[in-house]
Amino acid sequence: CFGNPKALRVFISTNVSLSTQEILDSYAKRWSIELFFRQSKQKLGLDKYQIRSSQGIQRYWLIMSFTHYLCCMCKGNHCTFEEGYFYLQKQLKEERITAIYRLIQHGASLEEVLTIAG
């Protein structure tokens, strides 16, 4: 029911001393973090890697954060992650097609074209 304002919402907390409003406020503060993780898993493959070294984890988080930032700032100003992600996907597709077209114009073999198209 994401995006449906009339959907029932359930907030769970193990801290029984918090009021309902305090739990809601906590969720509201964390919402952007939750969105980052959801988007990173769905679009950037965060849930596909297993890294065990501390240095590898730090490098991966840096790359993941930078990629997320690029998606949000790709048009020269702030946009939603989804808008930026699809914009960059479109740009990459256009660049790949342009490269294939240029290869064909210069008489590239089928193997060379397939390597770029791959």
Image (tube, rainbow, N blue to C red):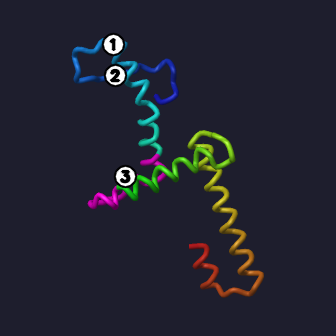
> In the shown orientation, is residue 30 left or right of residue 43?
left
Q: Is residue 3 above or below residue 103?
A: above
Q: Is residue 38 magenta?
A: no
Residue 24 position within the rendered picture, expressed as x and y whole percent measured from the top left:
38, 18
At label 3, counting other C-alpha atoms closer than 10 Å, the crowd grade (few under 14, some 14-19, many 20 or more) is: few
Viewed as shown, does residue 42 lie left or right of 55?
right
Question: Image point 66% across, 87% down: which residue?
Answer: 109
Q: Which mark is residue 47?
A: 3
Q: Are marks 1 and 2 in contact (CB under 8 Å)?
A: yes
Front position in the image: 56 or 11: 56
Of 115 and 23, nearer the camera is 23
- The quarter of the image holding the C terminus is bottom right
- Which residues fall within the magenta stretch? 40-57
Camera-side mark, 3 or 1: 1
Kind of residue sitting beneath label 2:
Phe
Distance Cα–Cα, label 3 vs label 1:
32 Å
Q: Are marks 2 and 3 in contact (CB under 8 Å)?
A: no
